[in-house]
Image: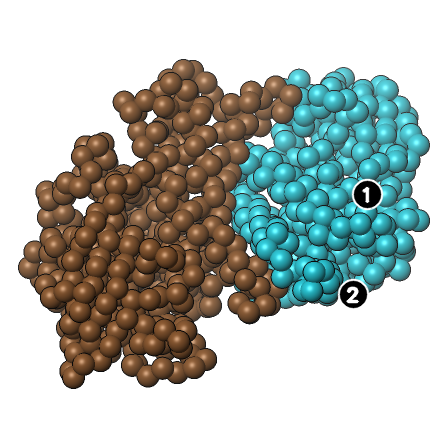
Amino acid sequence: MDFSLSNNAQNRIAMARMLAENMMRPIARQFDEEEHTDPWDFFNMMWDASKLNREATTLGGGGGKSSGDGDKKKRSENTLLACMQIEELAWGDAGLYLSVPNPGLGGAAVQAVGTPEQKQRFLANFYEGKPKWAAMAITEPHFGSDSKQVATTAVRDGDMWVLNGTKIFCTAGHRALDKSDGFVVVWATLDKTKGRAAIKSFIVPAGTPGVTVTKVEDKMGIRASDTAMITLEDARIPADNILGTPEIIEKDSRAGFGGVMATFDSTRPIVAASGIGVARAALDLLRECLTEQGIKIRYEASPYEQTVLEREVMNMEAQLQAARLLTWKACNMMDRGQRNSKEASMAKANAGLSVTRITQKCVELAGPLGYSRKMMLEKWMRDAKITDIYEGTQQINQLIVARSILGYSSAELN
Amino acid sequence: MIDFELDEEQQLIVETVNKFAADQIRPAAREADEAATVPQRLVDAAWELGFIQGSIPEAYGGYGSGDPSAITGALVAEGLAEGDLAIALHLLSPRLIVDAVLRMGSEEQKRQILPAYLGDSFVPGSAAVVEPRMGFHFLSMKTTARQEGSEYVLDGEKCMVLLAAEAPNILVYAATGDGIGAFLVPAGAAGLEIGEREKSLGLHALATYGIKLSGCRVPASARIGGDAAVMLRRARVAQSAMAVGVAKASLDYAIVYAKDRDAFGVKIAQKQAIAFMLADMAIETEAARLLNWEAAWSIDQGTEASREVALAHRYCADMVMKVTDNGLQVLGGHGFIRDHPVEQWVRNGRGFSVFEGMASV
């Protein structure tokens, strides 16, 4: 058991911290106030940095050498390093972190279930040319959590697939389709009557006829990140843009639907980490304010003498560290090649709740300063809330943990 | 690099402890609680397994291969407490003396004191930390130790002193004027008065007492180490680990019950209100475990870890109260009846916000 950070980890964190402080914080408020604008200087800078170090910003592991220690015998800590880095970037600004041009969740899907040919076509040269984004479009107006309700259809027509439907809440969908030469992975069904087994994902590149971004949402927080509604009207894509097999296999588990669901095991800790970054930003600033007021936190003071404020701060620090350790544990298991679905959901459920409470509490404790837009606490409270919702809501993750500890299938507990 | 895996030796220890707790401790727990006594056969069986001897390095006559780590101590404490808290505290009591001597004692003291705890049979340990007043805090003690020539004079009152009447020595923690000192007071010492056995909300099987020290004199050699606050932090790590063990017991028991109990045409575990309660219990227990592991690890690195220990202590005490209360709630009316252990775990669980110096790593 070891709670020390490797050299790799320390370097990764330090680099991300520099980016966060120097490139993200100075523009954070601007892109929160001016929603639906694009920080191109930031995009270009991050894109150039990513070209130099592929590992730096790809979600889901993106294949590549590890930088730093160079000792091949050392166990991989790729997932863990990604989480630590993302915590720092989100500490900088969660919306800007989500806006970084990279393969994102769309790329992660191709990485997880794509054929070598698809990976060659869509990932191998991703970082060439101008910044681009890849997104994932699952949610539709009538469902979020209940993902087998996909109603967007995919019908084979010669050597094309024809897609029809509407997707909402697609992170980076607008930038992927309209601002770059990117792509969106769209979940569609081959046959609504066949349920989950008929749901497949399709790579929809920018420029595909029939694909329109019909709305970019006005949000409570992470406002620098674009959240798109995408309408598909007889959108035509090549037949080999389907991820996984076009066969409808009843009781499908790993191929297609199951395979993409498994990516949640790595993306959930990562989303948890991003929330933790925001909460840490709030707690760090609150601590600074308290220090300025001459207020110290006496960790070992008697509960009979501790102020309510000290107690609240202690609780928040413990909650934040607990959230971080649960996240790291899920990462550690993934890096060790162990199934970590339960732990990934534990981390996500816990982080979602904790970062929401922490950021809300920090606004409360900072009084009028917390409520004012002159300070960032109110923004971080708005930014943090989504952590408890996307990539599986609090309640869905609680359900997954419950099924795991009870040994129940989704039919037995829903 | 960050790693949560146990090494081989730790895994073996955990397996052994868990088996003993499940096979021997848990089945004896109810009767021990009702009869307010820990069965001798259990004490003897635990002695055979060697938890205490394993925490003492070979150089001093024990089985331990190296410097006993706080993490390993936490693993043992959690496992035994999952069986039963009162019994676990009883079985681990020798460590209250042994750990203090190993961590803070002189070579002379180690050679003098440790052999008594390495014999053929179990010898209980005892420590006096908590004081009987509402405002008590482990860093502000009213029991004093005043140096007079080659002796210390101890004055004050303690409560929740486990096995005070059974142990050959009590390690008394007292304010020395420039911190906290630990003093080994032998049974029968003049000026040491052991009161009636206490009756508490929980821990019925564990014998605890109030004691009074009135001008109790001990030689300077009875003082173990200098600043003894470090041992009280280690105690908190052990206690926090035990809180995790008690919480796990409650969680696991509630899961079994909920999967069996029918209501409204399904098992109650299939109802979201119950399922989510259990999920939250599982998450909170694991979160607490990891926080305390980090605190234990920090101590093993040689740091004071006062912040980490304080945060883990508060978190674990709050967690075990919530988890054991929910564990009872899952059983409904049956949870209120002593035939099931969940109500006892609530009564034991409440203690973690009060316990100081009851165990050690």
Q: Position of residue A200 (x, y in %)?
A: 31, 73
In the rendered structure, the colour chosen for chain B is cyan
Identify the chain of the residue marked 1, using the numbered disc in the image. Answer: B
Residue B134 vertical position relative to residue A15 in the rendered view, above or below: above
Q: Position of residue A176 (x, y in %)?
A: 17, 57
* Placement of A262 over or under A52, stated as above or below: below
Query: Which residue is located at x 20 percent, y 76 percent?
Result: A161
Q: Nearer the viewer, residue B247 or B198?
A: B247
Q: Amino acid at mark 1?
A: Leu
Other residues around mark 1 within 10 Å, as few (<14) / some (14–19) / many (≥20): many
Q: Residue furthest left?
A: A129
Label 2 belongs to which residue? B23
Image quarter of residue A37: top left
Mark 2 residue type:
Asp
* Host chain of mark 2: B
Residue at point 18% right, 81% down? A157
Dot 2 or dot 1, earlier in sequence: 2
Q: Is residue A219 above or below residue A306?
A: below
The answer to which quarter of the image holds residue B253 is bottom right
B295 with respect to A169 (left or right): right
Quadrant in which the C terminus of chain A is drawn = bottom right
Mark 1 lies on residue: B203
Q: Is residue A371 above or below residue A162?
A: above
Q: Position of residue A159 (x, y in %)?
A: 15, 82
**In whole angstroms, how far apart are the C-alphas of marks 2 and 1?**
20 Å
Q: SS class of the residue under badge 1?
A: loop
Q: Is A159 placed left or right of A309 in the picture?
A: left
Few, some or many residues within 10 Å of mark 2 (<14, 14–19, 20+): few
Residue sitting at x 80%, y 34%: B160
Colour displayed for chain A in the image of the structure: brown
